[in-house]
Amino acid sequence: MRYPPEDMVHTAVAYIVFNRPQYTEKTFEVLRQQRPAKLYVIADGPRPGHPTDVERCTRVREIVAQVDWPCEVHRNYAESNLGLKRRVSSGLDWVFSQEECAIILEDDCLAHPDFFRFCDELLVRYADDARVAVVTGNNFQKGRLRGDASYYFSKYNHCWGWATWRRAWKNYHGELPFWPQWCKSPAWKIQVPDRVERRYWEQIFDTVCAGKIDSWAYPWTASVWFHGGLTATPNVNLVSNIGFGVDATHTTWESSPLAAVPTKELLELRHPMSVAQDFAADRYAFDHAFGGNRLRFPYSFLRIVKNYLVTGLRHFRRFLRG
């Protein structure tokens, strides 16, 4: 997808930042190169008990103040820390109170230039199609092409670089009030027919309802599913999450296969003939992006046996030591 360099990103961009200037510098430079016409900056405030947060948050805000292209800039900065879930959800509520659609990037999501054009075009194409709730820039299929088009439709709304419409975001419910009844309904089993996968997501959504996880992304996934939404997913990866590490909120493991996945050019944009979920792609995504293959027999059985043997050996060594 080659565009003239003077062409700006037409869709408003919501850019979510916090306290990691080393990543903000890299991802903001991409925005500078793409020159969106509208930019909404959402920033959380420093956390109490974290003495470096004030300096780091200040540095981040200095970086994002360097808008040197023609751009309508809006800023929503929290003076105290709201936490990940409240900051992102309240920030996007603010964005969609003013915009019909938006591209959303966090400060550790490094986007290929084609990501913005991809979102621009699909946000227009599916603006009034209630079947499509999200456009994502992520692809975790490890080179497997799904269909003959440039993208396919998935139930997984991967959110490391994505876009959506006001009509879809209004369905977001952070506390999942629908979950207690939905999880007992036939509709839930139809949504997730695989028993292993269903158990995986039930544990996560139960944890969200119990208030034990500070995540907006899990409630967003549940909300999209509850309303039957699909996600347009590119056949190449267009956004790389470079923020895995000890200073991340959730993605603290640096060895993840999802960390810093390379991006590729999308080339010519070809549209699918129909809007329909690609079940094979979603099965692969669950097994390889969410770790579902480790939950399935015989892997799960072998893991139980291994844990049993390791525990038995540990007790035996203690017995020998007296």
Image (spheres, helix red, strand yellow):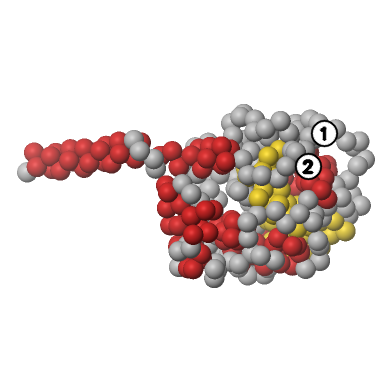
Per the image, label 2 sits on a secondary structure element best described as helix
Q: Which amino acid does label 2 sit on?
A: Phe
Q: Which residue is drawn at 73% across and 57% down?
A: 130
Spot occupied by residue 213 in the image (x, y as percentages of width and height): 49, 61
Q: Do the residues labelled 2 and 1 touch (CB within 8 Å)?
A: yes
- Indicate which disc residue 118 carries: 2
Q: Circle 2: is it few (<14), some (14-19), or many (20+) Cα within 10 Å?
A: many
Q: Is mark 1 on a helix, strand or loop?
A: loop
Q: Distance between the residues labelled 2 and 1?
A: 8 Å
Q: For this view, does 305 lie left or right of residue 250?
A: left
Extreme residue toward the front, this view = 186
Dot 2 or dot 1: first in sequence order is 1
Q: In which quarter of the image is residue 314?
A: top left
Q: Residue at x 45, y 64 (%)?
A: 184
Residue 15 visible to an observer of this rendering:
no
Q: In which quarter of the image is residue 304?
A: top left
Q: Is residue 15 left or right of residue 193?
A: right
- 83 in relation to 247, above or below: below
Using residue 38 as the reference point, say whether residue 311 is left or right of it.
left
Give the residue pinned by disc 1.
Answer: 1
- Residue shown at 60% from the left, 45% from the top: 243
Identify the residue shown where x is 71% and y is 45%: 275
The disc placed on residue 135 is none
